[in-house]
Image: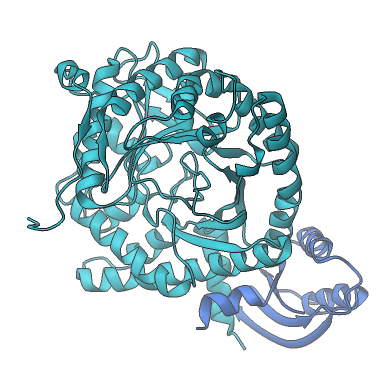
Chain colours: A cyan, B blue
């Protein structure tokens, strides 16, 4: 039998260290919902999501109560809507988003992802229609999330798409100016996007995925923080080992929940995403883990190395604990969702430049960063291009989720509420990049030998 | 199905009796009990069988929680699997 100490340790992790399952995400293929008439297509989308995800929330709540582990979010990801839009005669894709939003509300999930397009090598008719509709779709819906993949290691970077996304983000911010540019918090620009990511706002159900699948995202920065804070002055070998052990335990919990959800919903288990996803709650911070390693503030020199160790050790510990690992798997560094990151920005210790360096070694990119509302679209595109280059060259996922907060300037704060938190507006480099962005075309795929 | 009941609170007369009577009320069979008292705090862990339980799991968990709170105790019940998953390979 399990001994008392182990039982109490688990309870302490859940009660005091914010251990939770961050999300159970049901991936649903909508490929059989195509129809030339958009109203028919939207009807099929609404019906299919409502049918397959009918029991998702209740099942999540049942598992939560039986195992005593909080499952914070129940979500849905769908086939990139650009694939559906391509066969549709209508120019406007907003009705698709509205159908997704209605379905999400009907089944009770808090976000639905997949208002997406993959344009790393160029645009189809459907891609163009979808991207043109993103700002209005996000402004007119509550729960729909959107993502656009503009680059891959195999294809290089579509600089026309990069330029378009800079303008799209600005437009999305302006359409939701009264809520601080909220639409931008639901819009991610990716390089090397993954098809089985359970985390929002970047989740979509890739083309290579089955009809319906259950993916689970675990979390637990608070648990790692607690374990590391007890190791003052110890060498990095011990830090890495401790993170691995902790990640193992956390992931075993995710694997159990994923299998149980898959069995009860009679939907195949896809992957467990081993991510350390912070929340604004005190103690549930990735920044705090980096500071535990001896940095006076996240952003200090040494931050990138600390994050690299953390990211790698989380994967090493988690991989053995799950039969299938996927998604983004690593540490997330969203500024607005992490109390430690917010504090570091406020005290001037953490800049966009340092965050960019950190994205070279962690699982995502520049995430939930508010910048001044007058930042030009070209500058946002150039930020996207830099992030995409990091992803493409290093064969990893990178992303940009940036909010040019209308009417706000450096020092102001944008409040999003809930898990999205609040973002201090950060300065950007004000030198002009517009001629660079205006060139368009494709930055070629990189060579994968002669590595240095 | 087996589950773990944990009871944490200030030690006093009748805690075990109280918890056991709630469990027996709903036909939960107690398989094993372990308890420690550190200073004045009691921590009790019970392995129980809930196959014959007359309540749904969630309702049993809520009942234990509510009756525990009335006595200033933290009582929770969780399926055994979660501890096995976390601590055993």
The x, y position of residue A288, in whole percent, is 34, 51
- Residue closer to the observer: B37 or A333: A333
Q: Is residue B74 left or right of residue B62?
A: left
Q: Quadrant of the N terminus of chain A?
A: bottom right
Occupied quadrant, residue A131: top left
Q: Residue at x 75, y 36 (%)?
A: A106
Kindly tell me whether residue A30 is visible in this rendering.
Answer: no
In percent of width and height, residue A446 lies at 17, 47
One can see residue A346 in this view: yes
Q: Is residue A59 left or right of residue A187?
A: right
Q: How many marks?
A: 0
| Quadrant containing the C terminus of chain A in the rendered view | bottom left
B25 w.r.t. A407: above or below: below
In this rendering, the answer to whether A144 lies above or below A240 is above
Q: Residue B15 location in percent, x, y? A: 78, 75
Q: Could you tell me which residue is drawn at 35 percent across and 43 percent down?
A: A340
Nearer to the camera, A357 or A272: A272
State whether residue A271 is above or below residue A418: below
Q: Quadrant of residue A344?
A: top left
* Residue at (58, 43) in percent of width and height: A78
Q: Residue at x 18, y 21 (%)?
A: A439
- Looking at the image, residue A6 sits to the left or right of residue A434; the answer is right
Task: Find residue A9 and report its horizontal and vertical position in percent.
Answer: 52, 72
- In this rendering, the answer to whether B14 lies above or below A289 is below
Q: Is residue A146 left or right of residue B78?
A: left
């Amino acid at each position: 039998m399990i001994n008392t100490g182990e039982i109490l340790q688990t309870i302490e992790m859940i009660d005091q260290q914010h251990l939770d399952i961050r999300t159970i995400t049901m991936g649903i293929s909508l490929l059989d919902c195509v129809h030339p008439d958009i109203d028919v297509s939207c009807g099929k989308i609404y019906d299919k999501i409502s049918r397959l995800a009918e029991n998702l929330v209740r099942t999540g709540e049942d598992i939560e109560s039986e195992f005593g582990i909080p499952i914070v979010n129940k979500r849905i990801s769908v086939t990139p809507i650009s694939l559906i839009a391509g066969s549709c005669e209508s120019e406007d894709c907003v009705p698709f988003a509205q159908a997704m939003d209605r379905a999400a509300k009907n089944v009770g999930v808090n976000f639905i992802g997949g208002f997406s397009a993959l344009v790393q090598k160029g645009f189809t008719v459907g891609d163009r229609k979808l991207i043109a509709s993103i700002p209005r779709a996000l402004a007119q819906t509550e729960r729909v999330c959107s993502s656009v993949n503009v680059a891959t290691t195999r294809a290089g970077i579509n600089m026309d798409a990069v330029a378009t996304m800079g303008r799209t983000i600005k437009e999305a911010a302006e359409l939701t100016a009264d809520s601080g540019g909220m639409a931008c918090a639901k819009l991610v620009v990716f390089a090397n996007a993954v098809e089985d990511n359970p985390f929002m706002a970047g989740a979509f159900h890739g083309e290579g995925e089955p009809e319906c699948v259950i993916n689970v995202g675990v979390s637990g920065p608070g648990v790692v923080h607690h374990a590391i804070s007890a190791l003052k002055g110890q060498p990095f070998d011990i830090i890495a080992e401790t993170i691995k052990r902790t990640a193992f335990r956390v992931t075993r919990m995710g694997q159990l929940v994923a299998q149980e959800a898959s069995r009860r919903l009679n939907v195949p288990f896809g992957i467990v995403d081993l991510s350390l996803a912070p929340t604004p709650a005190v103690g549930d911070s990735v920044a705090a883990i980096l500071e535990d390693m001896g940095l006076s503030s996240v952003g200090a020199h040494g931050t990138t190395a600390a994050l690299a160790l953390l990211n790698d050790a989380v994967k090493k510990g988690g991989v053995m604990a799950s039969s299938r690992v996927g998604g983004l798997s690593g540490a997330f560094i969203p500024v607005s969702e992490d109390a430690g990151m917010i504090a570091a920005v406020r005290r001037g210790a953490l800049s966009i430049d340092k965050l960019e360096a950190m994205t070279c070694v962690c699982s995502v990119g520049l995430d939930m960063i508010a910048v001044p509302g007058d930042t030009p679209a070209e500058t946002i595109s150039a930020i996207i291009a830099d992030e995409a280059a990091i992803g493409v060259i290093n064969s990893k996922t990178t992303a940009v989720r940036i909010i040019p907060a209308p009417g706000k300037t450096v020092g102001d704060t944008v409040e999003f509420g809930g898990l999205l938190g609040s973002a201090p507006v950060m300065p950007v480099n004000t030198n002009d990049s517009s001629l660079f962005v205006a060139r368009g075309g494709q930055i070629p795929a990189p060579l994968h030998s002669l590595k240095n | 199905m087996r589950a773990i009941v944990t009871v944490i609170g200030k030690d006093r007369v009748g805690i075990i009796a109280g918890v056991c009577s709630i469990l027996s009320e709903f036909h939960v069979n107690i398989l094993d009990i372990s308890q420690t008292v550190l200073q004045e705090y009691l921590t009790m862990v019970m392995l129980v069988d809930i196959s014959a339980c007359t309540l749904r799991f969630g309702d049993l968990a809520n009942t234990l929680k509510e009756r525990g709170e009335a006595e200033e105790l933290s009582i929770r019940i969780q399926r055994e699997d979660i501890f096995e998953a976390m601590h055993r390979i």
